[in-house]
Image (spheres, rainbow, N blue to C red):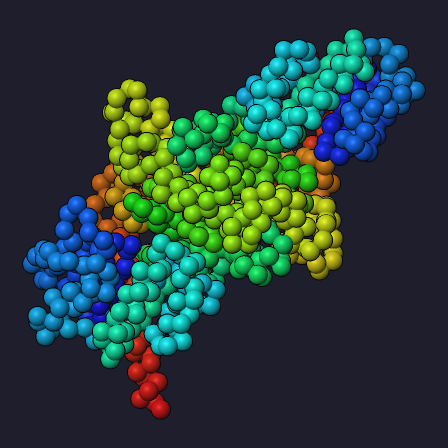
Amino acid sequence: MNTLVLIPGGKSLRYAGFVNSGETCTGVIRGFRWQGPRAALDEVRTIVQAMGLLDDVPSVVVHGLFGGEEFPAPASLDDDALVRLERVARQSPLHVAGLIETAHAVQQVFAGAPARLAFETSFFVDLPPRERTYAVSPDLSHKLALRRWGYHGLFHQAASLEAGRRLRKRGLDCPPRILSLCLDAQPEIAAVLGCRPITVTSGATPLEGLPGETNSGEIDPAVALALAGEAGLGPEGANALLVGESGLSGLVGHRVRLDDVLTSARSECMRAREVLLYRMLLASGAAAAALGGVDAVVFSGRYVSCSAVVAHDVLPHLERAGALALDAAQWMIFAKPLEGVLAEMANLQ
Amino acid sequence: MRIIVFNCGSSSLKYRLIELPGENQLAGGEAERVGPKTAEPARIHHQVAGKKETIVVDMPDHATAFAQVMKLLERDPELVPDAIGHRMAHGGPNFKQHVILDDAVMAELERIQELAPIHNPPAVRLVAACRRLYPNLPETVVFDTVFHATIPEVARAYALPAALVAKHGFRKYGFHGTSHQYVAQEAAKLLGVPFDSLNAVSCHLGSGGASLCAIVKGRSIDNTMGYSPLQGLVMSTRSGDIDPAVALTLLVRAAGNGAAVEGMLNRKCGVLGLSGMSADIRDVVARAADGPAADIDQLTVASQVYLWRIRKYLGAYLTLVGGAHCVIFTDTIGERVPQVRWAVTAGLQCFGLDIDSEKNDAARALPADLSTPSSRVRILAIATNEEMAIARFSYDLLSSAQAERIAL
């Protein structure tokens, strides 16, 4: 079956067409928010039609970052899903409002095509309470729908499934203990036991956890409050700074990509690389303790090509501490891009 | 040399008179309810050679409490101190060593006191009162942050724009350093390892604050607390790590009142916030085991969240240290609650930890080795003694200064 994958972002819309599971076209529509999702999708329709993707009725998969507890699994894009999305929008208004607009446009532009929504957070819906709960009163957690999530669930799930398959082929007959490292603009590390995540570095929002291209990652909450107060930024200004001007770019002094930082020989990137690798080391150790040892290490994400840099830095530490049940050199790569993961998901339904 | 060590709380003043270098404790006690009048009267519990007495006396401030303590000691000429050692929670960016008090030190203490608004200001006021009332008595200041001055830049940096960091000084400081260093030194003695070769993870689990410290070659290389004591583990009333976006959301809900949010995250969260019934993890663990059925879910989650955070940081630091000689448990919870030690180390054989449940349950007299003979990493419970550590630092500082004067 032909498949069309749509990944709406803040400013652009990524799309990819698959005919019989083979990728036939891929691209980005810029100015997505500015021109509106309807116009952008019309443009996508024209492109994929020319590629023959619409000769048969394709299935459409729409990517969502946050689905909350309403979406523990991919769901058909129908009226019920839209009602549930409206409820989720109260928790993550920015991300979900855009997705709702896109979902409506998909229903119009690709009317009659079976469409599905797939969320990054679904994999983490059943994160154990000890991991997902913040140390605040249950009342406050309830009022703010406050809990921890992961924001690269699709990569972690697909990569750990693949790692589990390979381990079973090698004879492992118990649930594998997998350290999953997603190298993306906002990198994320998860511990996966069997098929279930038991820890993840991100939090209530993607801001918490590892430093990303522009987000600070973990900081003392007192620093966040001081930025808003003493530094005079106010809550919105502090949030904008922590999300958009910090992280690796903040450390380097100008906008950088994660792969630049991991592989560049430029001295300006060295400190940012050291900070990132240090945080990854700590997060990997924490994940190993959560799992009680690691059977497999798997890398995924947009910058998976940089896996060796991380593996060579982090894994020898885990090996020295005794936490790796494998040779530090035996890490795995899950190289499929997000578009491919989503297309496979559509074909599995 | 008789050194009186003061450990100043917001409404209390603990003291201990110690004779150095023999390390004999001559007297000790605690002034309670220092400050504005409360439902019960202010009093001093004073102890000399096993004899205890309680003196009820008005103590509107720490200066008065200090004067009353000195009055008690001066009843016996053998108990008159030769020097004063102060505990200071935060040393800011410039105090990388413990110091003998002088005008420059006093000025810097006053300048940085708002870095630890709960802990430093009363301690600074006490230092000033001591100078005023006993100007001829040498004073030393021992900082909780000094042991962490060796944390490398990569570990103390937050991923924030450099200009902002330069302007506001945002960085990890780390706390409980005096305790971490003391128990690590004791562990080195116990294991027969030179302190400057010791690799360890120290778990200071207090009934209030708590932190873990990664130690390599006797030097702190990381601590779970950060710019302030709020970051890191779940504590009695502190949230520990929380998404910065959540802190900012709370700020919006509090109409921009940062002090209210900081107060809430410091005093109403942690074990107290999660359990809704007690700030003490011992109560929560006990009630989760045999309390009313209606409370069990909430209390179980509270204890699990508390324990899970320690376990994760323990794994992180064991990985960082790589080849630790030991894991050390100390302070009220670390020394006295075997369930906590068990829950955070059991199943970590992959890290070389093999705790012996019988030894763990039976450990009363400390120090104790709680690990099985085959455990690659020793698991130790060691009683902390911050006052003794402060007395030792003070003695070393004052003796060196005296030797320098003689040499001149």
Could you tell me which residue is drawn at 71 percent across and 22 percent down? A101
Depth check, front residue: B262 or A275: B262
Q: Quadrant of residue A117?
A: top right
Q: Quadrant of residue B346?
A: top left
Depth check, front residue: B250 or A194: B250
- Residue furthest to the top in view is A112
- Residue furthest to the right in view is A50
- Residue furthest to the bottom in view is B408
Depth check, front residue: B189 or A170: B189
- Residue furthest to the front in view is B255
From the top left corner, tell me how far across and down residue A335 is, in percent: 73, 33
Could you tell me which residue is drawn at 68 percent across and 40 percent down? A185
Could you tell me which residue is drawn at 33 percent across and 79 percent down? B400
Count the numbered circles shown: 0
**Eyeballing the image, is B371 above or below A87?**
below
Confirm whether residue B364 shows in the render. Answer: yes
Could you tell me which residue is drawn at 29 percent across and 54 percent down? B10
Quadrant in the picture for the C terminus of chain B? bottom left
Q: Is residue B166 left or right of residue B259?
A: right
From the top left corner, tell me how far across and down residue A136 is, in percent: 41, 35
Q: Is residue A154 left or right of residue A19?
A: left
